Amino acid sequence: MPTFTNPVLAGSYPDPSVCRVGEDFYLVTSSFAYYPGIPVFHSRDLVHWRQLTHVLNRPQQLSLRGFDTSDGIWAPTIRHHNGTFYVVSTIAKQRGGSVTFVATANDPAGPWSDPVPLEAEGIDPSLFFDDDGRCWFTGCRDTVPSVAGAPGQLWMRQLDLASLTLVGPTHVLWHGAMRGAWVEAPHIYKRDGVYYLIAAEGGTENNHSVTAARADAVTGPYVTDPRNPLLTHRHRGANEPIQNVGHADLVDTIDGETWALTLGVRPINGSHTLGREVFLVPVEWTANGPVFAPESGCVRLSERLPSIADPQSSKECAEVTRRVHFGEAALGLEWNSLRGPADAFLRPAPGGTGLDFSLSPEPLTSKQTPAFIGRRQQHIRFSSRVSISFAAADPSEEAGLAVVQSQDRHATLALSVDASGTAQVVLKAWETEDRCIRVTRVPVAGSDMLLAVEGDETGYTFRFKAHGASEWTHVASIERSFFSTESAGGFVGVYVGLYGTSNGQASDNLARIHWFEYGQTPELLQPTPPNAAAEPLQVTG
Ligand code: 6LW
């Protein structure tokens, strides 16, 4: 039987939502404080996804300055109706809904409209288009008075498509199968005249699950499905490779199969660093409602291919290392900055390849837009390298590689200088925005360097070597769990990228980035433990 490998989207792409138009599927995910916001993907087989654009890719659409990395854009839903694509989503602040909006496009590849705010409290908005042409907006919000474990209420209003405003009365739909356990992510589907409300419950961690209720009228009353939860891994052991499964959206293929896209994580020894990823799960409709993963009852790393998929496409394709030389063309869609565009810090280097990277006074601990561009870590075993030329003029100046979980939790490997002006490679590990727990400095000769970070099941290893040198110098290894969601908190996975800062000082210095590469590494470039050329770790703060 031809199979595919889950996840179908690796790395931090939580809260997937999907719709189909003819033979084409479109998928969106959360993007938090990263910019551009809300990636839009296309697929013909539900397994292979290619990014088309972002919904929020113009600075006037969105500013997330001041936002925590895990606030910002949460849980979008994408739907298509009468030639128009709709995305509804919420800007979250301090881990709660602040502004919910709708954006529209005729072409999912954009341009998308400016976001239109809706009079909707809470988070996790969704749209359902009924057969009579009416559009129903659903969301979840705290119950009043608020209870522990909120949000606890799924609610609905009609969305007037001409004015893009919510109209008519509010209908309270459901409080979940496990009251008070974060009933979220509502989506409504209609099957044989019955309305099915699918939700997430238990919170996005170990107790996450998919639950359901049904009704004969769109506004309810909704009756709890006695089979709940319909999909979860909360009852599975610690060695289960996929955990925290929940937050699903369903889609029918053109030949009548139903599939769910759901989030899950792949922990190792109890912690995960890649964030919440997208998994594809078969669904069978019965008279009782949807049955998730009817053969196995769980989300599997290897699953049967959808019937629409080409059996030849089922082979797992390991991502080869990609070296980006930058140059004149715009950055690829995999690149993000934080809270707004980083264009002001970037310009093509003279000569057609390379990037001139200015230093920002804002460090990565800032909640503004630092001089940072990064891409998701999508593989446990990966290697990332940058070829950089940078002569720091002052110890406050640093530029190089960054491994970012949040403004609190990140590590950098950079070129800088000490107080006497001697060039050095400096590793810093930040535990919180005001606590740098590791600084390792290695004096170097010259300013042309390769900086590298390699990750595996154990940790992240940082190395460097001068251009043309044969040996890498080991700087430090940081245990993998340091960058994990379980340790750092939040809703995002790790990013790997480039940064430059003058740490609060004015600077017009530039770092030249010749190339950057990221790739999956089945084997490490060099075995650890490495040589001892680096100074011992200093602990500060
Ligand atoms: C999202 C909520 C959730 O809005 O996490 O997994 C929040 N569930 O539904 C942020 O991703």
Image: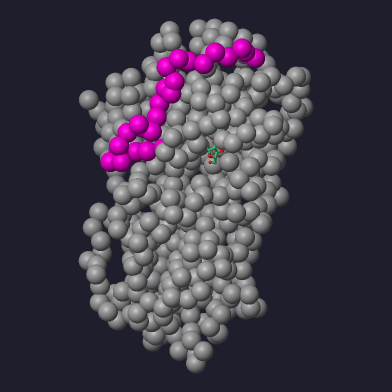
Percent position (x, y) of residue 134? 67, 16
Judging depth in this view, the residue of 443 and 116 nearest the camera is: 443
Q: How is the image coloured?
A: one colour
What residue span does the magenta drawing correspond to? Answer: 219-244
Percent position (x, y) of residue 149? 56, 35
Quadrant where the N terminus sits is top left
Determine the residue positioned at 43% across, 7% down: 287
Q: Does 198 lie within the magenta span?
A: no
Q: Relative to residue 177, is residue 223 depicted above or below?
A: above
Q: Is residue 104 left or right of residue 210?
A: right
Judging depth in this view, the residue of 319 and 111 nearest the camera is: 319
Q: Relative to residue 482, is residue 52 depicted above or below?
A: above
Q: Does 239 lie within the magenta span?
A: yes
Q: Which residue extends farthest bottom?
A: 420
Determine the residue positioned at 55% across, 33% down: 182
Determine the residue positioned at 54% across, 42% down: 30
